[in-house]
Image: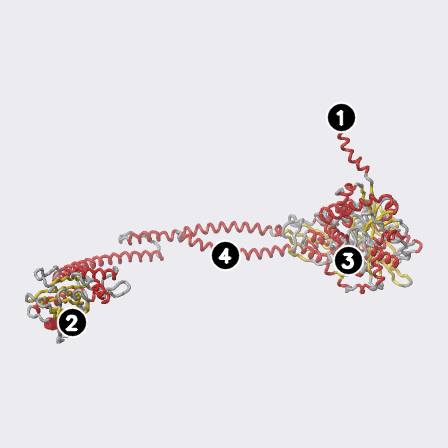
Amino acid sequence: MKKTTLSRHIIRNVLLFCIALFLVTFSVYYYFTRNTIRETTRENAIFLANNTVNRIEQVLTPAEKIPEIVAKMLESAFLSKDSLIPFLKSMLSINKNVYGSIIAYEPDYFPEQGMYFAPYVCRQGDTIHSVVLGDKNYEYFYMDWYQIPKMTNAPYWSEPYFDEGGGNVLMTTYSVPFYTYKDGKRTFSGIVTVDISLEWLTEIMSQVKILNTGYAFLLSRNGVIITHPNKDYVMNQTIFTIAKENNQPAMRETGRNMIQGKSNFESAGFRSKWKAGKLWINYAALPSSHWSIGVIYPDDEMFASLHKINIILLILILVGLSMLSFVIYKIVNKLTSPLKHFAASARLIAAGNFNVHLPEIKTEDEMKELHNSFSFMQKELGDYIVTLKDTTTAKEKIESELRIAKEIQMSMIPHIFPPFPDLPQIDVFAVLKSAKEVGGDLYDFFVIDGNKFCFAIGDVSGKGVPASLFMAVTRTLVRSISDKESSPSVIVGTLNKSISLNNESSMFVTFFLGVLDLSNGELKYTNAGHNPPVIIKKNKEAVMFDKTKFIPVGLFEDFDYGQSSIQLEPGDKIFLYTDGVSEAENSESELFGDGTIMDIIGRNVTAPPRELIHKMEEGISAHVNGFAQSDDITMMTIVYNG
Amino acid sequence: MKTFTFKAVILLFLLFSPTYVHAQLPKITFAPQWLPQAQFAGYYVAQEKGFYKEAGIEVEIVHPSANIQATALLSSGKADLISLFLITGMSAKNQGLDIVNIAQISQHSAILFVTKKFSGIDKLGKLDGKKIGIWKSGFDEVPKALMKEKSLNVEWVPILSTVNLFMMDGIDAMTVMWYNEYNNIINCGVNEDELNVFPVAEYGYDIPEDGLYCLKSTYEKRKPELLKFLEATLKGWDYAAANKTIAIDMVLERMKQAHIPANRVHQEWMLDKVLEMIMISDKKTKRGELLESDFLKAAGILDNSTKSKWKYTFAEFYKPLDR
């Protein structure tokens, strides 16, 4: 694992929190500021559009009045046919915005004039020129400026057009139908128009400055581009053809809204080839001509100030976070520096140096508490170690004494083999392996009256020193009793009486005692609650003695022990053992068992005593497989040679 | 010095020789029936890609104006060959202009009536008693014949060139060309789904339109050259169909030269639709041929719509070049 420091950990967590906090704050700020800017821009845009609309209307609206008044005059028959041209001339001379004007009559209105009669005056340089229009090549009845107001019975602002006669100037015509009374009926009689040059319009529109690169454009009622910074669009394209050419359906929709006279400020759903990036558009209609003015706001410029503030804010925050990290690092380091010392001290203490110097803490905080705990621990550990030393010394002393006790115990049982070199009738071998330093098992053998071989094996309840002392007592009693008695039942009974008396600790011993008559091979024995030994008939099967009916020695003073006898043939062997053999456990708590004992004996029926016991030891060792010995292990083998 | 003179002579020869060769090519002056637009893209392409020169003829394209029609150019000798609607050509012949049809380029009718959906006119029959705009300059025989056949009493309002009267709802319906005025309406912001259309072809009046005409005398004298013109023209149309952008560029250039407002989107639409008209589709004829059945149908229309009866046989009117 990568090593980290507390300060780094704290800085990371604090920074994450601060960044999250910043993001939330920034988003809210950004959202509201953006809305505010959009709202402000919207207000400005509407103001700008209205302002521009008004400037245009200041020319168009008064221009509308002229033909409307003329139409009224014609209807009221104020004007005679001959006064029309002088009237139009004088009208033109006082209306500088009007480029030309016509009064066009219906066919054959004046029979003497024939089919066509359309007095027309127009400016040519500084002079005002007049002509009567209308002939086969100029059938004005079919022209939009005439036909549309006639058919719709309403004044009409024409689509803008380039006037080829007047120096290719962009023009528009306002036409008003007029009516006269014929046979008392108000009848459509013709059209009065004024032609307005739109040069000033381009001028007004180009004066509209929006941000850095925003611009304004003007659409006719049909969506034709009347003014646009891109001159190629003007009068060649409609907003709808541009939309199709650039595959921008949203532009078509905006265009439709515009020519329908709607007004709005909105995020443009389209992109423009003319101005890259996201755009906003404000559009508004001209009340007179129903043309529509569009004002384009580049999004990036609209929010430029916001973006600038964002960058400054971001830098400030980055600097702030760096400084915060530095301060946290310093504070945490100062607070936690004693911890390093404590850690070092703890290591030294663990190594046994209880008097190590602890860091000095001047504050009265958690660090001071830690210091106090440490110093308390130091003192307690010191005390404990002193106690431990004393205990250990005492324990060592006991252990040494136990070792000596063991030596004494072992010296009490016979351990020289063969024990009776001058008695060829028998051979004996025995082992005793204590589980603890001193054990409760015992074995013994000796010769009575020169021809009787007495042997015994026993297991004292409990373990350790008490058991070994009990065992020593038992052994001594057996020896002293058998000085006068050679009957196993008497020996065991006397032993039981002696032990049961004053047996306040309620200890007992399982005991097997046999007396073999060397002259005839008769074996008399008493088994007081001990594991039944095994008799191995020479070169024949091995069998266990019957289970005893007698209780262990030391329990009831007056228990009456009996005895049994069998006849041994030369070569017969007896194998005796304690429960340490049959109950030897391995790590899986499996017992060695009587069956295994019998197997090993079965495989070694001919083996001499020493070899048989070694084989048994190997078997136990293989079974326990290094698992700690829990009980004394005692085995004895006697062979009767006859 | 001597070497220099020699080189100069060679150079001069090289410079003037093509002109010299051109001067030898027979020249045909062709006038389409209207101002430059994609309707005539095949001719412009054939000229600019040199198909006419390859065929061994020199072609000059002149356009009529609002005042001087193509037929006038033909009769005055300012054009050798003109393009006319079938019915216009037949009408002109009936009125005494001794012309013959040498090829029928367009095989279908592009004429349709258009109404605004809100007017409620969604069946041809509902046009009865309505005002319908129609070109003042002609092409009116077929729509008028259709209305007469259907016994619909309509008020025809002659219109010079714009769709403005229709846009301003001064009329209830308008006669338009599928490749031209119809798209003008769309380009004025009216959506297709806001319009009802009634193509005359759907009412049995699929009368072919653009064809090539010359004076009978010209046909008799210059047959091989006319054939070359026709073949190179069809090649021009093939090229235009395969290279629309290049063809449109050529059309727009012509329009600019003629000081006509030029709009790429509209010309693209026009080229697409005109190419559809040239397609033979299910007709049992080959490209450039006039079917006698179409001729007879057109003659029937003329008989019904004009006072003078149609006077010529198919063979007298149509002089196919032996292709």
Residue behind mark 2: A528
Few, some or many residues within 10 Å of mark 2 (<14, 14–19, 20+)? many
- For numbered disc 2, what is the local secondary structure? strand
* Amino acid at the residue labelled 2: Ala
Outermost residue toward the top?
B1
- Image location of residue A256, percent across then percent down: 71, 57
Mark 4–mark 2 distance (CA, rounded to whole Å): 89 Å
Q: Residue at x 44, y 55 (%)?
A: A13
State whether residue A467 appears in this view. Answer: no
* Amino acid at the residue labelled 3: Met
> Which picture quadrant has residue B155?
bottom right
Tag 2 or tag 4, which sits nearer the N-term? 4
- Image location of residue A215, percent across then percent down: 68, 50
Q: Are marks 1 and 4 on the same chain?
A: no
Which numbered disc covers residue A21? 4
Letter of the chain that mark 1 sits on in the rendering: B
Which tag is nearer the camera, tag 2 or tag 3? Answer: 2
Which numbered disc covers residue B167? 3
Residue behind mark 1: B5
Q: Nearer the viewer, residue A160 or B65?
A: B65
Q: Nearer the viewer, residue B167 or A128?
A: B167
- Image location of residue A331, percent across then percent down: 41, 52
For the residues labelled 2 and 3, say whether their Cβ atoms are less than 8 Å apart: no
Q: Nearer the viewer, residue B77 or A62?
A: B77
Q: Is residue A258 left or right of residue B93?
A: left
